[in-house]
Image (tube, rainbow, N blue to C red):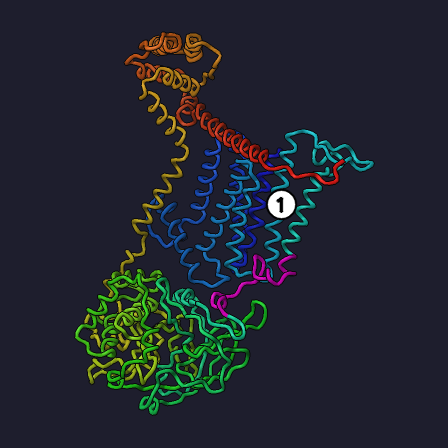
Amino acid sequence: MSGRAKLTLFAALATLLTSWSLNALVDSQAWLLQAVLLLAVQSAVGAGARRVPLARTLTVAAQVLTSLLLLAFLYAGKGESHGDGPLAYLVTDFGALFGQGVRDVGEFAIPAPLTDGIKLLLVSGVLLIGLLVDTLAVTLRTAAAAGLPLLALYSVASGLAGGGGASWFAFLLAGCGYLMLLLSEGRDRLAQWGRVFGAAPRRGAADSGLANGAGGQATAPVKFGRRIGAVTLGLALAVPAVLPSLGGGLLGGTQDAEDSGGGGVGGTISAVNPLVSLQSNLNAQDNRVVLKYRTNSPQQADQYLRILALDEFNGVKWEASGRALVDVPEKLPEPPGLRAPVSRSAVEVTTSISAADYYTQRYLPMPYPATSVDIGGKWRFEPAGRTLVGDQLGRDKFQNVQGAEYTVRSLLLKPTAQQLQNAPKPDPAVQEEYTKLPDNLPPVVADTARQVTQGAKDDYTRAVKLQDYFAVNGGFRYNTRTASGTGPQAVARFLADKEGFCVHFAFSMAAMSRSLGIPARVAVGFTPGEKQSDGNVNVSMRDAHAWPELYFEGVGWTRFEPTPRSGINIPEYSRAQTPATQPSAPAPLPSQSVAQPSTGPSATPECPPNLKKLGECGAAAPAQNTGGGGGPSVTSVLGWAALAVTVLGLPLLPMLWRTRLRARRLATGDVLTAWRELGDTAWDAGVLPDEALSPRRAASRIVELGRLDEEPAAAVHRVAGAVERALYAPPGAEVSYPELADDVLLARTGLLTSVDRLPRLRALLLPRSAARVSWAISARRSAIAAAVSTRLTTARLRLPRLPLRGRG
């Protein structure tokens, strides 16, 4: 096996060993065999193209085209598209499955089920990395640079998988594959120099000549390289385990995103944004139960389980501001802002909650406002948000709610609309802190808030009007597929598009409330869940929710519901405009319709607004469905068509380059440039250039070897005569003539006509003169290298020489 063939083999092997790290992302390894087979075909195509040989660009193009065709034929027909014809079979269905894979990645938790879409993403990703490694290591002969795509593949897989006990093994495989690739390239380079000079062979062993000889003993450079690789790989595995400060590095286990900002004892809650996973929970296909609870609350529909409050809007996102943590008191302090008579009418309820073993939230879900919590483990309390957060248990390990069973006592507040309407002005400190808005907030937010609340004389009425604007009469649609941007521009875009999910509604109402001077923040947690026949209530992933909390003096932080989602409970105190004939109690199972929001029947056009507020009607009308019958969009078809045209157009690049160069040369009217074009045209037709000949002799050679007829031959001689005049005529003499370009084109037609069909196609599609591009790049690279070497040598000579001690 040749050195380049071995290098191809080790490049594919390095890619496959690194791809092992992707196994942690899915629950099945069935995709790996398919990736092995396709990568073997892709590498074989590259090896065959280099053996022909083809130009480097054509080699890569052949590999890309082969890989795309194999993927299309393997996966076409498995997507959601229902088009007809070969284009739909090879492109449209393939694109639909790719899009489905992207959606599956966003919906499933790791390890995800191996759907056809995810399998397509994994296999195509491995092929892409394999193509980059093969191009860098074999085609361009820079195996060291091939480590970059390998590192990218391992980093993505390790980052998504979150480390784990098997991460060191995946790293070991990836490192060994890369070292073998480097060793293979080194042996190939040494073989090109002939005999390797190193240590003498052992007694009794045959002289090896190259890296391995007949005796099978490796020479000193190869053995030394192996030792360096083994020691380096061992250090990379051992050092992070020995040094605690490196525990969170490449091989260390990672915490959840929600765990990354916590502190230890006496620490603070740092900027945590749990909304990263909220949208994934709402879109999850495996709607798992994460919490179960039993309560004696007379209004189970108001039993929201709150995780934490996001109270800081910094212009980029809403997040929890950094606040000091304290020990959890036996009885929690009074809720901020709660006063008589609301406090006297409050009812204390008891809720017993159990969390699933796979629910690793660090913040404790509980009703608001809690008065006491009975739970085991190490927990800390944040008074402003009334949040319990898991304390640090060890290095990179924190207390979480996984599998916990705990009891929470909380207050069921029953403020009336009149109490909220007559609430006095809030405390100045609360007013100042919770009405802050970023300077870059678009003016449309405040303008819309003033327009919606026009005519309202108190903060409560303004809050209800904002809630009704989003939930009832503003024309907003509930859609969990909308991107969850949280910056100020995202709020303005949401007000314009009028489509989103609870994050958009909560953030927008909170921002608009602050613009009106109403203290506001955003709470994150779960809706009450679904009551079971045994009296327990199940809270699933799709019950994840975000809602705004507005502050009213005498009541405290008060929940509002702007999200027009079926099953969402509108608080009783925010129904001031609801007619008395409408029911005042919510449905007993508020989240039953939430479990499947996309399949429930939508509201009829006659559904009154007050029933929408109670969650009895769907928010989106059937006319809003823009799915297009499930077929691919025009943008998708055009995109895949453009990709197909690009792939099929790659082999035409040399011809297009040659055509452009010919037109540019002939447009100058310069005789020597036209002569160069004529020589390249003859070269493309099979007449090799000979720079040692005179113009007249070179013209005769072109006419003779090109078997030109009388007219093309005369054209060649006219061009050659003009070249002689340009070379030997006195300065200022006219050497060009108007028919110069026509003569070159006439000669080109004669040269192409005189050859057979296959040589003519090669002259058009794969012109030999395209080698000048490679020559030019090589010359440019050599010039740059020489210039850099000269500058380095000059700089080194200018450095002062250091005295040598002990010399002599």
Quadrant containing the C terminus in the rendered view: top right
Can you give x and y, in whole percent of width and height, for residue 657 in the image? 38, 29
**Identity of the residue furthest to the right in this view:** 203
In the image, what residue type sits under mark 1?
A: Leu
Q: Is residue 278 visible?
A: yes
Drawn side of residue 669 relative to residue 453, left or right:
right
Q: Is residue 781 above or below residue 586?
A: above
Indicate whether residue 477 is drawn in magenta. Answer: no
Residue labelled with disc 1 = 179
Q: Is residue 624 above or below residue 553?
A: above
Q: Is residue 713 visible?
A: no
Quadrant containing the N terminus in the rendered view: top right
**Identity of the residue furthest to the bottom in this view:** 344
Residue at 54% of width from left, 31% of height from top? 790
Q: In which quarter of the view is residue 805 placed?
A: top right
Can you give x and y, in whole percent of width and height, for residue 50 in the image? 53, 32
State which region is magenta.
238-262
Can you give x and y, in whole percent of width and height, for residue 293 in the image? 45, 81
Can you give x and y, in whole percent of width and height, for residue 694 in the image? 45, 9
Q: Nearer the viewer, residue 770 or 301?
A: 770
Drawn side of residue 163 relative to residue 90, left or right:
right
Residue at 40% of width from left, 22% of height from top? 760
Q: Nearer the viewer, residue 300 or 34?
A: 300
Mark 1 Cα within 10 Å, few/some/many (few <14, many 20+)?
Answer: many
Indicate whether residue 258 is drawn in magenta. Answer: yes
Q: Nearer the viewer, residue 436 or 718?
A: 436
Tag 1, which secondary structure? helix
Q: In which quarter of the view is residue 304 placed?
A: bottom left
Residue at 55% of width from left, 72% of height from top? 392
Drawn side of residue 89 relative to residue 360, left or right:
left
